[in-house]
Image (cartoon, helix red, strand yellow):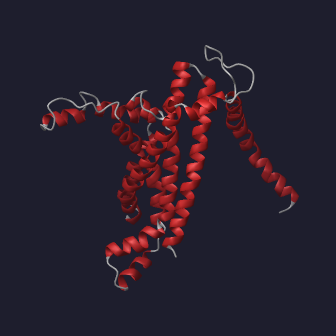
Amino acid sequence: MTPTRRWAGLAYVAPLVVFLAALFLVPLVELFRLSFSPVDTYNAALPGFTLNQYKRVFTEPYFYGSLLETLATALLVATLCVVLAYPAAYVLARRSAGAMRTLLFVIVISPLLTSVVVRTYGWVVLLSGNGVVNRLLVATGLRDQPARLLTSYPSVVIAVTHVLLPFAIIPLTTALGGLDHNLHRASQTLGAGPVRTFLRVTVPLSLPGVVTGALIVFALAMGIYITPLLVGGVTQPLAGIRVYDQVETVFNYPVAAALSFALLALTLLSTTLLAGAFRIWERRLHG
């Protein structure tokens, strides 16, 4: 590549770099600086440097407990999304191009075309005391009175799984759609049945899609807070809600910044470990 073309390429990406630096890196650096600021008795940030905010995050159960709860919830949601996404992705991948495949794909991505607040309020309507679910429970005699579905942890997991499910279906569909069907025919010719072919051929070859979908969902679930907040309420012990509470209720911005960076570090560490574990699994499957 000539120097002229190299500089031309840099000129093309320069606006994007400046845009990301201005709207992402600069606020991130400022938030990181804020996390080391001391506070007065009214939780207002003061000039100076202190580790007290991080000490609180890692020593008070209210904060570090929310980090552990968030990690467990993200792992659960990622697992549920992959399990639920695989059949849908398998059907989409095996469908030939046509109106039905297009319709199915539109249904899959339709949640992404709607505001997350609108989708979440849909769950609020369904799970409320006089919502559809409770009316069905009472009408069928399964309960004498409406159940308290909102503000519960299972409701939060269900709603978050619904919101993030398309992010698992799309990479899985891509991975399954790229498989060579001759491998399935060869497996069956050698005497393997449909189940064994699926477990020994389809699953190992679709593992990149599984890994991609699981990591995307996991990373998004670690930082999600709007859906848990609207469905489960501010009492849910998730780190994103704890950050929201520190900003909107306690007005302790340094602690909120410290908790945010602790959550970011935990997300990066967990994602790295999961990616490594998936890579080891993939090597074992492929010998």
In the figure, residue 35 lies in which quadrant?
A: top right
Residue furthest left as drawn? 141
Name the foreground residue: 110 vs 240.
Answer: 240
How many discs appear?
0
Residue furthest bottom as drawn? 190
Q: Is residue 27 visible?
A: yes
Name the foreground residue: 165 vs 46.
Answer: 46
Asked if residue 261 lies left or right of residue 144, the reply is: right
How far across and down, in percent of the image, does residue 286 sit? 51, 74
Is 216 placed above or below 36 here? below
Is 91 placed above or below 54 here? below
* The N terminus: image quadrant: bottom right
How far across and down, in percent of the image, does residue 39 sit? 66, 19
Residue furthest top as drawn? 42
- Image point 61% across, 43% down: which residue? 265
Name the foreground residue: 204 vs 239.
Answer: 239
- Image point 16% across, 34% down: which residue? 143
Q: Is residue 165 visible?
A: no
- Image point 42% across, 47% down: which residue? 77
How far across and down, in percent of the image, does residue 224 sit? 49, 38
Is 52 placed above or below 277 here? above
How far across and down, in percent of the image, does residue 6 sit? 82, 56
- Image point 53% across, 36% down: which residue? 64
